[in-house]
Image: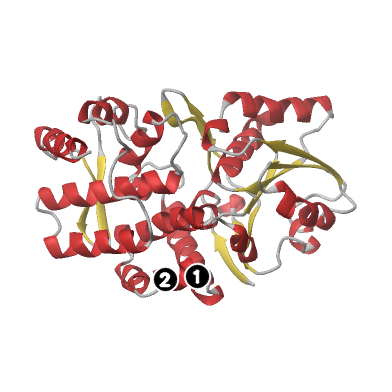
Amino acid sequence: MRTLNVELGDRAYPIYIGEQLLEQTELYRRHIPQGTKVLIVTNETVAPLYLAAVAKALNGFDCMTLQLPDGEKYKSLDSLNRIYSMLLENNFDRQCTLIALGGGVIGDITGFAAASYQRGVNFIQVPTTLLAQVDSSVGGKTAINHPLGKNMIGAFYQPKCVISDTLTLNTLPPRELSAGLAEIIKYGLIRDSEFFDWLENHVSPILQLDSNSLSDAIERSCRNKADIVIADEREQGVRALLNLGHTFGHAIETFLAYEKWLHGEAVAVGTRMASEFSEICGWISREELQRINTLLTSAALPDKPPPGMQADDFMRLMAKDKKVQNDQIRLVLLKKIGHAEVCNDYDRDLLYRYLSRITASH
């Protein structure tokens, strides 16, 4: 087992990475006050695979479970209210612990429930997808979606620990593995060019579930994210760089009503778009752009926006992005592989022409 620490003073917590961690009672016990109630929140896809193992590890606790439907569209106020109702109906107090067993949707909504129930209760992340293990489970961003914008309602709230059992990735569909790679590639692009170089030679082993390659990629990604979160927990500065590709990607997800595409697939297209626009602005070279596009393609990720989405759709939906300031859409763009910046000094007419061109091709 590998252990990383997110050093946030009295909110510091460990990230455990390894095999067969789900059933290790001691990992949970370290982070749950003895004798308190526990609610495991999961979904209908993950529950048949891993709920029994986690429940067994929690033997001795007063443990209940809640299964939500699977899908981004269920990261909603209705689902959040189901969690609140179960907690209230069963007299969960401020000493209770919520455990998020699943991917990013379950982690985000359970974390937000924990942040807001009785103004804050214990919370443990047990991510079961590659994307959640390398990104959404780390850093304390919790949220639900609104029909008008993704992740617009939420809170910064750190878990007590993150337990990433890499064996859960063996049951992931290929699309989910690829979606996770989109976030892994992001770290190489925004701050870790050596990691990007490494990924160019290790995408295939990761997709083939090579244990060492997976663990290395997860650990390096978590270390990059932890460093950023430690420097800027509440996204007042450098943490915004983690949104490379997300301004375009969230617009795609909102346009599709959080259906059809996975989050990582939308981020992959958004990353390609941010890279292409960076090259158009003269900030990265044609050769760098080709390397980026080749890596994204090798990860079996989509390469263009969904059919029917137009430039005006992007502009309208990106105006709802959390990075908008004074009605200005700020974009995370690349200055080179391994270095990104949050920009608002780009040519907006040039952006619109680029969006018109890329959406006119399908």
Viewer-closest of 195 and 202: 202
Amino acid type, callout 1: Gln
Amino acid type, callout 2: Ser
Residue sitting at 88 percent across and 54 percent down?
59
303 on left or right of 31: left
**Badge 2 density bin: few <14, some 14–19, many ≥20, Cα 10 Å:** some
Disc on res. 237? none
Q: Quadrant of residue 147?
A: top left
Q: In the figure, 342 relative to 12: above or below?
A: above
- Residue 216, position in %: x, y? 49, 72
Do callouts 1 and 2 mark residues in contact (Cβ within 8 Å)? yes
**Residue, disc 2:** 204
* Residue farthest toward the front in the current orientation of the protein: 362
Residue 105 in sight here: yes
Q: In the figure, 322 relative to 290: above or below?
A: above
Viewer-closest of 125 and 268: 268
C-alpha distance separating marks 1 and 2:
6 Å
- Residue 85, position in %: x, y? 74, 25
- Which color mode does the image show? secondary structure
Residue 238 in sight here: no
**Residue, disc 1:** 208
- Residue 132, position in %: x, y? 54, 52
Q: In the figure, 209 relative to 235: above or below?
A: below
**Badge 1 density bin: few <14, some 14–19, many ≥20, Cα 10 Å:** some
- Quarter holding the C terminus is top left
Residue sitting at 66 percent across and 37 percent down?
114
